[in-house]
Image (cartoon, rainbow, N blue to C red):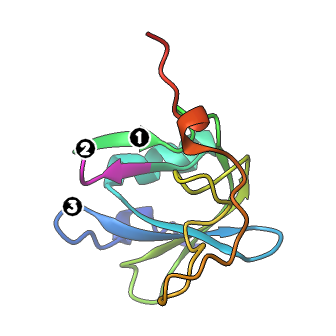
Amino acid sequence: MADLLDSLTYDGGLIPVIVQDAATRTVLMFAYANPEAVALTRDTGFAHYYSRSRQKLWKKGEESGHLQKVCEIRVDCDADCLLYLVEQTGCACHEGYFSCFFRTIDGRTILPLLKDPQKIYHKIQ
């Protein structure tokens, strides 16, 4: 069986990552990863990504405690997109929802708010 890590295609140094709950297959979020993030995800078993807005590598849950334990990493047919199947601890969404896809295009909220985002990301001063 061939290892696909070295055959991944990164556009501008990043590869898109779709994240699904391993048990329910609910789509939790979409993010980007650079080669280091993909390697760390694979090596540690916890999801790592690259933040385009902060221009840095980050481990999901490093501030909130809402970790993503990666059960499986899948590669699409073109090797230019990844799918992480995860066990989500807490909220995947920084706005306090289980999934980042908590509303419809017309603005209707379809998932319950699980946690106040102010309580998720409190900083010790």
Which residue type carries mark 2? Arg
Q: Is residue 51 magenta?
A: yes
The quadrant of the picture occupied by the C terminus is: top left
Q: How far apart are marks 2 and 3 (CA)?
A: 15 Å
Residue matched to label 1: 58
Disc marking residue 1: none
Q: Circle 3 — which element?
A: loop
Q: What residue type is labelled 3?
A: Gly
Q: Which amino acid does the dot numbered 1 rest on? A: Trp
Q: Position of residue 26 (x, y in %)?
A: 71, 75
User: Could you classify mark 1 by the number of other residues whose Cα lies within 10 Å: few (under 14), some (14-19), or many (20 or more)?
Assistant: some
Task: Give the x, y percent position of residue 121.
Answer: 52, 33
Residue at 47% across, 88% down: 105
Mark 2 vs 3, N-terminal side: 3
Residue 52, x across and y down, in percent = 25, 54
Main SS of the magenta segment?
A: strand
Compared with residue 121, is residue 71 higher up or lower down, i.e. above or below? below
Residue at 29%, 73% (x, y): give it: 9
What is the number of callouts on the image?
3
Q: Which quadrant is the N terminus positioned in?
A: bottom right
Which residue position holds label 3? 13
- Closer mark to the observer between disc 1 and disc 2: 2
Magenta span covers which residues?
49-53
Q: How far apart are marks 1 and 2 (CA)?
A: 9 Å
Relative depth, front residue between 15 and 94: 94
Position of residue 58 relative to residue 1, above or below, is above
Please give the name of the residue rendered at 57% of the width and 39% of the height, measured from the top-left corner: 61
